[in-house]
Image (cartoon, rainbow, N blue to C red):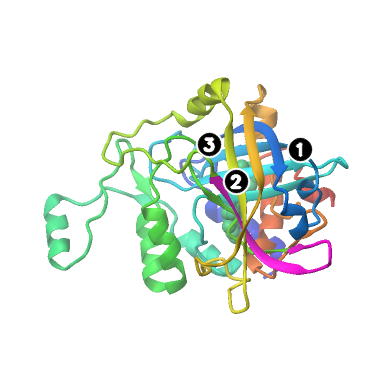
């Protein structure tokens, strides 16, 4: 199947019955913030991209809940997103899109389509106490109880997919335990795919990027009744008094690591380079133009950063472009290239 055909199928497969077609089909609820990126003194030795050799680069960041549900459920366990657009000194932009899961669900667009279809939300009731006890006797962990007001869930289909496809087990397990952050800026975000960065001497390295919050990672109490709508206000209140900062970490892959399969983790002792610090310090007033209508695209790269051969990364270009057109957002910048 061509990238453009499967991209359209992927967008339709991701749409949820409780979503809104005028909004993003995933990462629907969010807020944008502005700030700047400052490279570390060594970043330019590893990558010639301009934001690693410019004192300060302005950014716009969109934080989001991973779900495609159009009703706010901030306190529910969910993946979160952080999409960063760097406004480069020559007037062009480059995007780095990341989420709180370090690995992805499927190694190819076709297998992700199967995953999305199987994990389409189904009615969710949880288990009765007797069902939980019967499960425990068979050494099966009990299902979680539904949140107040939760009637459908992707969990059952996702678990079934993971049972049948070993490559999905790491990400499905991590997603099931991910929880809810106390703040969008108290979570670590991963760009998941491998990119190729070029150094000034022409050396090319296969790398993975992550944002680490300088204030540390902190989740809400999983046993407390979840608050439905706090993350956006929390960011507004926080930035009225202080800034929030993230370190951009770049992990360098070695021979034998999976460069083209984002379901596979790399060994934890790989060399990591601190590439710079992102500071967010303000919330744009116009959250329609500067949040709802924004279109990020993982294909919006710049000289010095290139794609690996990961087929999921490649299909995302057309997918995001199509999704942005469908919801009548500001034209996806990738389509201008
Ligand atoms: C084939 C795999 C994937 C598909 C089909 C897919 C699909 C989508 C779609 C359709 C959107 C909405 C785009 C728009 O309307 O602007 C989106 C947004 C997003 N995706 Fe993915 N995605 C995939 C993989 C990933 C991966 C691996 C990550 C993690 C790095 C990721 C993180 C995000 C984030 C953070 C957003 C929100 C961007 C924003 O704030 O505008 N996605 N995705």
Q: Nearer the viewer, residue 123 or 311?
A: 311
Q: Is residue 236 left or right of residue 157?
A: right
Spatial distance from mark 2 to mark 1, Cα to Cα? 14 Å
Residue 94 vs 263, above or below: the answer is above
Q: Nearer the viewer, residue 299 or 282?
A: 282
Label 2: few (<14), some (14–19) or many (≥20) C-alpha neighbours in 10 Å: many
For the residues labelled 3 and 1, say whether their Cβ atoms are less than 8 Å apart. no
Spatial distance from mark 3 to mark 2, Cα to Cα? 24 Å
On the image, the x and y values in percent for residue 162 come to 40, 67
Q: Is residue 25 left or right of residue 290?
A: left
Can you tell me whether the CB of the residue at mark 1 lies under 8 Å from the nearest atom of ligand 1?
no
On the image, the x and y values in percent for residue 141 come to 23, 60
Residue at the location (49% across, 47% down)?
A: 16
Residue 307 vs 82, above or below: the answer is below
**Which residue is disc 3 drawn over?**
29
Which quadrant, please, contains the N terminus?
A: bottom right
**Quarter assignment of residue 228:** top left
What residue range appears in magenta?
197-212
Q: Is residue 210 magenta?
A: yes
Spatial distance from mark 3 to mark 1, Cα to Cα? 29 Å
**Quarter assignment of residue 3:** bottom right
**Which residue is disc 2 drawn over?**
247
**Which residue is disc 1 drawn over?**
56
On the image, the x and y values in percent for residue 335 come to 80, 50
Label 3: few (<14), some (14–19) or many (≥20) C-alpha neighbours in 10 Å: many
Mark 3 falls on what kind of element? loop
Q: Disc 3 vs disc 2: which is toward the camera?
A: 2
């Amino acid at each position: 199947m061509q990238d453009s055909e499967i991209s359209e199928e992927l967008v339709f497969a991701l749409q949820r019955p409780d979503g809104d077609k005028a909004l993003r089909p995933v990462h629907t609820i969010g807020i944008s913030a502005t700030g700047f990126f400052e490279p570390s003194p060594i970043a330019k030795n590893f990558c010639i991209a301009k934001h690693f050799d410019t004192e300060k680069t302005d950014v716009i960041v969109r934080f989001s809940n991973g779900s495609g549900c159009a009703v706010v459920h901030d306190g529910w366990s969910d993946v979160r997103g952080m999409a960063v657009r760097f406004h480069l000194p020559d007037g062009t932009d480059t995007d780095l899109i990341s989420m709180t899961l370090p690995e992805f669900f499927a190694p190819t667009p076709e297998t992700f389509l199967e995953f999305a279809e199987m994990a389409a939300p189904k009615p969710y009731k949880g288990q009765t106490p007797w069902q939980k006890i019967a499960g425990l006797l068979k050494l099966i962990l009990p299902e979680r109880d539904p949140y107040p007001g939760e009637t459908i869930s992707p969990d059952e289909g996702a678990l079934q997919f993971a049972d049948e496809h070993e490559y999905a087990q790491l990400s499905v397990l991590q997603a099931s335990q991910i929880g809810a952050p106390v703040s969008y800026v108290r979570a670590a975000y991963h760009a998941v795919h491998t990119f190729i960065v070029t150094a000034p001497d022409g050396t090319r390295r296969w790398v993975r990027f992550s944002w680490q919050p300088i204030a540390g990672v902190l989740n809400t109490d999983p046993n407390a009744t979840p608050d439905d709508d706090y993350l956006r206000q929390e960011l507004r209140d926080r930035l009225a008094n202080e800034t929030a900062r993230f370190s951009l970490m770049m992990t360098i892959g070695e021979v034998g690591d999976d460069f083209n399969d984002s379901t596979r983790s790399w060994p934890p002792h790989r060399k990591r380079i601190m590439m710079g610090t992102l500071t967010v310090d303000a919330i744009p007033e116009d959250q329609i133009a500067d949040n709802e209508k924004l279109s990020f695209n993982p294909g919006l790269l710049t000289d010095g950063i290139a794609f690996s051969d990961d087929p999921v990364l490649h299909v995302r270009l057309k997918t995001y472009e199509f999704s942005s057109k469908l919801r009548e957002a500001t034209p996806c910048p990738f389509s201008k290239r």
